[in-house]
């Protein structure tokens, strides 16, 4: 019996270890703040500071945005115009479905098969932003992000991303110098991460979206390449949430967006709001699964023992039922 219990425990520990290993990066993301690479307020010059002009500009003055075609919906015209009016000296590139595909075919034909097979348009919109940043450099901004101040102070870093809640980074605003090693790593990883996870929201998030980018960012930090702030530097700096939007001195204003979210996304958000209930339920389900596993295991061991020795193991035999009538008879003489 002791041997069978030991084998059962070892098998369960191996299963748990494999599960933890498969989601280890996701687990470590929960505690990753990005503070080591954060852009501090002291590094960001004031709006009127002459220091802005004296700093090296590593990121080209290009603003990239994406949409189905060149007719941007009215609800996003204001944020788009904010950025264009504030950066008249920047080149503006709107990547439509047609121009995006033409660019991939022309410059990265090895990716066109994966690009065409994406089941959701938002995946192609995600992918193209990584390719244009790796190729041209510049700043990518979602259509629902308006500009609250000029981006020039951020152009002195080789690349930057911004933190998001509750963990990880987002891909709605980011920037890079051309051929930055992080974005080269991102575009090279897209094909291997392309798989169906059942729910559209999860599939998008983990194949091309913010979760995908967050996992690669975490891996990149562990690779030893996240170093160097100069012209050929590979470091990725992190814009803090308070410097990203809706705070005095922040760079962006956010408008209504997330047009691709569906019922499954609302379910995921509900899960986030009810994490404590789901945690308790998870432990209860795990307990039930463990009991069922133990029940099945004991029967498998007993069956093997019976086939080998022609009888049930001792621990399987139940204690004989006591004869109540005999007990009563005997009690008379006590």
Image (tube, helix red, strand yellow):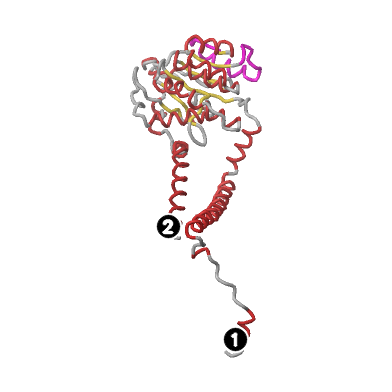
In the displayed structure, would residue 1 be above or below residue 189?
below
Q: Is residue 51 left or right of residue 196?
A: left
Q: Is residue 29 left or right of residue 322?
A: left
Q: 24 or 91: which is nearer to us?
A: 24
* Label drawn at residue 3: 2
Quarter location, residue 33: top left
Which residue shows up at 62% across the image and 82% down it?
326
Which residue shows up at 62% across the image and 19% down it?
76
SS category of the residue bearing label 2 = helix
Q: CA distance from mark 2 to mark 1?
A: 41 Å
Q: What is the count of numbered marks?
A: 2
SS category of the residue bearing label 1 = helix
Q: 248 or 39: which is nearer to us?
A: 39
Q: Position of residue 109 (x, y in %)?
A: 49, 13
Q: Position of residue 310 (x, y in %)?
A: 50, 60
Q: Position of residue 110 (x, y in %)?
A: 48, 15
In the displayed structure, would residue 241 be above or below residue 313?
above
Which residue shows up at 61% across the image and 26% down it?
258
* Label drawn at residue 330: 1
Stretch of the chain drawn in magenta: 68-94
Q: Position of residue 6 (x, y in %)?
A: 43, 55
Residue extending farthest to the bottom is 333
In the displayed structure, would residue 11 be above or below residue 29?
below
In magenta stretch: residue 88: yes
In magenta stretch: residue 7: no
Q: 322 or 191: which is nearer to us?
A: 322
């Amino acid at each position: 019996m002791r041997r069978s219990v030991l084998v059962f425990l070892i098998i369960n520990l191996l299963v748990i270890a494999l599960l933890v290993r498969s989601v280890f990066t996701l687990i470590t993301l929960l505690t990753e703040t990005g503070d080591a690479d954060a852009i501090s307020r002291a590094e960001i010059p004031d709006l009127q500071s002459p220091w802005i002009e004296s700093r090296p500009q590593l990121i080209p003055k290009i603003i990239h945005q994406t949409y189905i075609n060149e007719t941007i919906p009215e609800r996003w015209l204001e944020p788009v115009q904010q950025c264009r009016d504030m950066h008249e000296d920047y080149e503006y590139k709107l990547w439509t479905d047609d121009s995006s595909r033409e660019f991939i075919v022309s410059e990265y034909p090895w990716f066109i098969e994966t690009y065409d097979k994406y089941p959701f348009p938002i995946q192609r919109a995600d992918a193209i932003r990584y390719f244009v940043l790796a190729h041209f450099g510049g700043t990518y901004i979602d259509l629902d992000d308006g500009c609250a101040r000029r981006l020039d102070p951020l152009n002195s870093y080789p690349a930057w991303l911004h933190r998001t809640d509750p963990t990880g980074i987002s891909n709605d605003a980011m920037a890079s110098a051309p051929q930055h090693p992080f974005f080269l790593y991102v575009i090279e990883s897209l094909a291997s991460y392309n798989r169906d996870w059942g729910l559209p929201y999860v599939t998008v998030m983990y194949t091309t979206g913010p979760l995908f980018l967050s996992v690669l960012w975490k891996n990149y930090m562990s690779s030893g390449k996240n170093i160097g702030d100069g012209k050929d530097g590979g470091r990725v700096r992190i814009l803090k949430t308070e410097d990203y939007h809706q705070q005095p001195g922040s760079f962006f204003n956010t408008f209504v967006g997330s047009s691709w979210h569906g019922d499954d996304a609302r379910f995921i958000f509900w899960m986030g709001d009810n994490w404590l209930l789901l945690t308790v339920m998870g432990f209860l389900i795990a307990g039930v699964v463990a009991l069922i596993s133990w029940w099945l295991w004991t029967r498998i061991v007993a069956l093997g023992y019976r086939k080998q020795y022609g009888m049930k193991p001792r621990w399987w035999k139940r204690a004989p039922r006591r004869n109540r009538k005999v007990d009563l008879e005997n009690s008379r003489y006590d």
